[in-house]
Amino acid sequence: MKRIIRTKYYILRFLSKLFIVLLLVPLAYNYIPVKKGKSTFYLASSDIDSVIQTLHENGYGVSKIDALMLHYFKTPPKGWYHIRKVPKERFSFFKHLETQKAKTIRVKLYAGETSDELTKRLAQNLKLSHEKLLEEYRRQTKYLEGDILAGYYRVAPKADERTIMTALYSISKERLKHFIDTKCDNPKNPNELELKVLLIFASIIQKETNDKREMRLISSVIENRLNKGMKLQMDGTLNYGKFSHKPVTPKRIRKDRSYYNTYIYGGIPPAPLCTISLAALDAAIHPKKTNYLYFMLNKHGKHDFASSYKQHIKNIRAFRGKKKLDNNSSRKN
């Protein structure tokens, strides 16, 4: 009997010590201050692991233990944050993190721009370094151009260049995923190559027109020509990089030996050409069903479409106001 009582006593004593340790460890941990990092940062997700990773990447001294602690607090929603002062107590830091929202402004990224133009406009709007923004764009890029969708974005003006570009990439990636999930029938989850091809198609459409009503028609021309094994022969594919806004002349067509020259090479260019809109992306996924193989700018700033080369020549003559046209000098777009 005494042995049983003694055993129970030791068990009770052990459990009491364990309880005290379990109570004191969190209390002690609470008074280990969080090392302060960047004041302004963007949370791409409210997932606990994502919150911890973002804080760590922005210089805050957090660990896996903090991830466990966060289960007992309301995790902050995705968005922009500005930490003015780090509390001395660790728990207080996480408890009030969701209230530390940053002030934001709305910026617009224009369709048809190159990465150089996009970052230059951002630098002007946010009073940041164009060189650093472009460097960050290129550090995170997959395709050199077209990585960030056109449209409106909310950004924190107090953020630095790396934080701004990281946030834009994150938001754009989320928008693209939502678009694919809701608009793309097959495949639902395109692989990297399929996604790249889709962005290239959309960028060609974007270079050829900003008119949403014409985008699906131009998409049909691209699809029809490729299906027939024809070269695209589109000026827009030659408006890449430093040639983005330069007129495409017969001389340029003869001399440009890059794979962006669809007058010489079959298929599509090797990479997206510019920033694209969701409208161009939608047109790339859903081309209109037509027999069109050609299109030509008309005097009203729109395009005339044709199923035959004979009609295309008439459209060219109507635009140029000529009765005769040298077929060898005509361009089939």
Image (tube, rainbow, N blue to C red):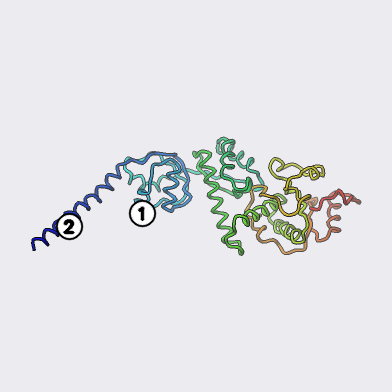
- The kind of residue tagged 2 is Ile
- Choose the circle earlier in sequence order: 2 or 1: 2
Mark 2, Cα crowd under 10 Å, few <14 / some 14-19 / many 20+, is few
Tell whether 319 sits left or right of 195.
Answer: right
Q: Is residue 151 visible?
A: yes
With respect to residue 160, does 324 lie above or below? below
Q: Position of residue 173 (x, y in %)?
A: 55, 52
Q: Name the residue: 70% across, 45% down.
A: 240
Q: CA distance from mark 2 to mark 1?
A: 30 Å
Per the image, the residue denoted by label 2 is 11
Which quadrant of the figure has residue 179?
bottom right
Which quadrant of the figure has residue 177?
bottom right
Question: Disc 2 on helix, strand or loop?
Answer: helix
Q: Name the residue: 43% across, 53% down.
A: 47
Specify the farthest residue to the left: 2
Q: Which of these two is toward me, 269 or 330?
A: 269
Specify the farthest residue to the front: 3
The label shown at residue 161 is none
Q: Name the residue: 72% across, 60% down.
A: 223
Question: Disc 1 on helix, strand or loop?
Answer: helix
Q: How many numbered circles are shown?
A: 2
Q: Position of residue 149 (x, y in %)?
A: 60, 50
Q: Position of residue 58 (x, y in %)?
A: 45, 42
Q: Which of these two is toward me, 207 or 267?
A: 267
- The kind of residue tagged 1 is His
Mark 1, Cα crowd under 10 Å, few <14 / some 14-19 / many 20+, is few
Q: Is residue 302 visible?
A: no
Per the image, the residue denoted by label 1 is 71
